[in-house]
Image: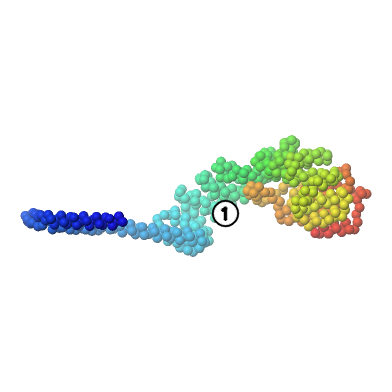
Amino acid sequence: MIRLILAVAFAIFTAVLGAFLALNPGRASFEFLGIQTEMPFVLAAGGIIVFAFLMVVVWWAIYMAWSSPDKLRNFVTRRRREQGYDALEKALIASAAGDGETAVRQAARADALLDRPALSRLLAARAAEAAGNIDGAQAHYEALLEDNRTRVMARRGLAQLAHERGDHNATAEHAQDAFNRAKGARWAFEALFDAQIAQGRWEEALDTLNEAERRKQMAPDRLLRRRAVIMTAAANKLEEDQPERARDLAEAATRAAPDFAPAATLAARLLTAGRRFKKASDVLEASWTAAPHPVTARVYRELRKSDTRSKRQERLKTLADLQPEHRESQLIRAEIALDEGESATAESLLKPLLEEGAPSARLCALAARLARLKDEDEQARRWMTRAAHASVEADWSDMDEDGRPFPYTEDDWKRMVYVFGDEARLIHPRYERYESAAEAVPETALLEAPRAKPASGGVTPGSGTQYFEAPRQPDDPGIETDGDDELNGEDAGRAA
C-alpha cells in the first residue's frame, strides 16, 4: 500500500513538473573552451542528468576493477570455510554414528579446508576413535597437549583411552593433571577417583574425595557414604600394622555414616581391643539407632567376653529398645523369648511378622522352634518343611570362620564404595554367589530344642542370624525322636 501511494505521488510530481516546464520553456546558454552554445532549458537539464549517470557508471566500473581481487579472494576464503564447516559437521555426525571411515575422510577434508589446528586435531582424534584406530587417536591427543588451551581436553581423551585399556596408572595420571588444572571439570574428579579405587589406593581416594567436597562436585549424602566406606576399607587394611590409625579411621567412618554397619563393627572391635568398652558400646548403639543390622547385634552381644549369658541377654534387650518397631529388634525379642521358654511372648512377636507375607526360612525356623516349645511336633515339622523351601535371607553370621564380621575382599570393598556410597545398600558377596546353599534349619537342631524353660538356650543353628549359642542336650529325657522325625530332617536338608 505504501509503495502504491509513493508511486502515485511520484507520478503526480512528474506531471506537475512537466506542466511547469512546458509553461515556462526558457533557454540555457553554455560557454566552454571558447565554444558558446544555446539550447532549451529542458534539453540542457536532460543532458546534465545523462552526464551524471554516465559518470556514476564510470566510477563504479573503476571501483569494481580496483576491488575485484580482494572480493574474489574473500569469496574463495568464504567458500572454503563453508565447505570446511560442512565437512566438520559431516565428520561429527559420522563419529557420533560410529561410521569411522566416513569420519576419518571428512576430518581430513575439514583439516585441509579450515585453518583451525586444535579443532582439526580434536576432530581427527574423535574420528580415529570411531574408526578403532586407538594409536592414531592417542597421537592426536598427545599433540593437543602442546597447547595450554587444549591441554585439559587432551587429558580427558587420553584418560578415556587409558580407562578403556584398563591402564589405571595412566588414567590416574591424566585425570590428576586435569583435576589440578580445571577445578570445574567434574569428569576429572570421577576418572581420578575411580582409578584410585580400582587400584585400592584408599587414602589417596579419600584426599580426592575431600577436594571434591571443597569444590562441591558431589551430593553431600553420597559423599559421606563413600567416605565412610573408604575409611573403613583403609582401616581394615591397616588393622594389623597400624591399629591406632585404623581405629581413628574406623571411628571417623562411623561419624560420616552411622548407618554403615561394617564401620561400626570394625570400630567396636578396635576399641574393644584397647579396652574402651564404653566407647565401643556407644558406637554400636548409634549404628543400631541409625539402621539396625544383625551383625551389629551380634557384635554388641559379644562386646565383653567375660559377661554371663543373662548379661548378654539384657544387653540385647537394651539394644532392641533403641528401635522397638524395627524388624530386627522384634526378632531379637522373639529369640530371647524362645530361649527363655516364654512361648506367649514369642508368639505375640512372631505372629505379625509371619502374617506380613511369605515368610523367609529364618522366620519359618523360628516358628518351628515356637511350635516345638508348645509341644506341637506336627506343626513344628510343617514349619521345618516350609523353611526348606522358603526364600532365604542373607546369613550375616557365617561370613568369617574366625568370627570376624564383614570379611570383605579388596574387590568387595571396591564395589561397596559405589553400592553403599550411591545406593545406601550393603552387599553380602557369599550370599549373592549362592555359597550358603544350606541355610535351612536341620531337623536335629529342632529335636534338641527345649520344650520347657531351660537353664540356657539359644537360636537354632542355621536359622539366619544367631544371637545366642544353640543348646546341646543329647541326654535330655524330654526329647523324643522317631524315624519320621529323622526322615523329615533328611528330606528338609536335601530340599535346602
> 200 or 60, which lies in front?
60
Residue at 66%, 51% in the rendered image? 411
Label 1: which secondary element: helix
Q: Is residue 354 left or right of residue 94?
A: right
Q: Is residue 426 left or right of residue 381?
A: left
Q: Residues within 10 Å of mark 1 (few under 14, many from 20)?
A: some
Q: Position of residue 257 (x, y in %)?
A: 66, 42
Residue at 23%, 56% in the rendered image? 10
Q: Position of residue 158 (x, y in %)?
A: 52, 53
Residue at 53%, 46% in the rendered image? 179
Which residue is identified by label 1? 163
> 423 or 28, which lies in front?
28
Q: Amino acid under label 1?
A: His
Q: Is residue 423 left or right of residue 343?
A: left
Q: Position of residue 305 (x, y in %)?
A: 80, 40
> 128 or 238, which lies in front?
128
Q: Position of residue 190 (x, y in %)?
A: 57, 49
| Residue 363, above or below 323 | below
In this view of the protein, can residue 409 be seen by the observer? no
Residue at 78%, 40% in the rendered image? 317
Name of the residue lying farthest toward the bottom: 101
| Residue 55, above or below 327 | below
Q: Is residue 102 left or right of residue 345?
A: left
On the rendered image, what quadrant is the N terminus found in? bottom left
Number of callouts: 1
In this view of the protein, can residue 109 be seen by the observer? yes
On the rendered image, what quadrant is the C terminus found in? bottom right
